[in-house]
Amino acid sequence: MIEEVTPKKSLGQNFLKNQITINLIDDILDIKEHDKVIEIGPGTGAITDNILSKTKNYIGIEKDRKLSEKLLKKYKSEVKILNQDVLDSDFSKLFDKNIRLVGNIPYNISTQIITKCILERENIISAHFMMQKEFVDRIQSSFGSKIFGRLSVYCQVFFNVNKYIDIPADDFYPKPKVESSFFSLVPKSKIVLRDDEIEGFLKFVKEIFNTRRKKIKNCIEIKNHNMYVNIEKRAEQLSIIDMVDLYRELKNDGSFI
Ligand code: SAM
């Protein structure tokens, strides 16, 4: 199907064309018959063929109308392909819990997809995505690294992040300017925050990384400088546990609400 399509840059259309990589992804996914899979942007069906050979509990969400029509023609009534924007989709209305998300994600919506996974984390059991390598390195980086940032914390609070492979630009048509990585997010069974702390903590993390060059003591107006966590450090130098402790200390003494 790939040869019949004129790729649209606006929809981040870089189609996987290397069958060896496609099969490697299939091995990593290890889809079982009972799995409920939502594929984001099936495109020309590069990953879809393998998924459908394992499970029929499949829904593809494809924004490109022409591509979704081609997919429906190719797979007939066998599958459900929704022609809609994934960012307007409510996964919990498509399958009841335990959803496996899969997708070669357009680079321009990567951050929104991660945010969506966080919001819908109770409905999914795993998300396996291909995204820009630089972006994946960022979300799985640890404190002390220059690339450790807000998104790394957001992801690692809620998910175990695991990168499997880097994929060269040559494996795609058209060839993108960047390398990609295939990785997974698996929701943690227990997170370090209580439910009533989540919203405030995410706000706190955003605030301390907005001024990442500044020491913590200069990012936030702190009433009591006698803190357990070292406020001489910058946000990127704090572990997630330190950030949670600091957030709780600041909340308790009224410096951060
Ligand atoms: N899965 C195919 C592959 O690996 O060859 C296509 C991947 S291509 C990088 C991204 C796909 O996502 C395209 O088919 C594009 O039309 C679709 N897409 C882009 N934005 C979307 C959105 N907001 N919602 C749903 N699909 C989207």
Image (cartoon, rainbow, N blue to C red):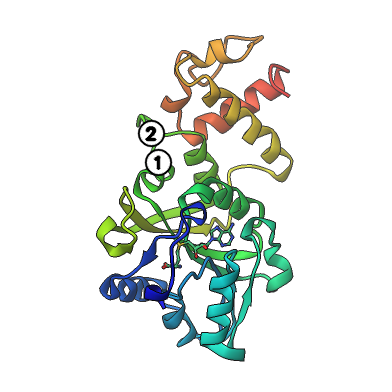
Question: Is residue 193 or residue 132 the one in the foreground?
Answer: 132
For the N terminus, give its image quadrant: bottom left
Q: Which residue is mark 1?
A: 138
Q: For the point 60% across and 48% down, which residue is it?
A: 115
Which of the marked residues, 1 or 2, is nearer the chain's N terminus?
Answer: 1
Question: Which quadrant of the figure has residue 19?
Answer: bottom left
Q: Which residue is mark 2?
A: 147
Mark 1: which amino acid? Arg
Give the Cα separation between the discs numbered 1 and 2. Answer: 5 Å
124 left or right of 17 in image: right
Which structural element holds mark 1?
Answer: helix
Mark 2: which amino acid? Ile
Please state the horizontal and vertical placement of residue 9, each as a whole percent of the image: 46, 54
Q: For the point 57% across and 74% down, which residue is it?
A: 68
Looking at the rendered structure, the number of numbered marks drawn on it comes to: 2
Q: For the point 61% across and 15% down, which residue is it?
A: 220
Q: For the point 48% across and 14% down, which residue is it?
A: 214
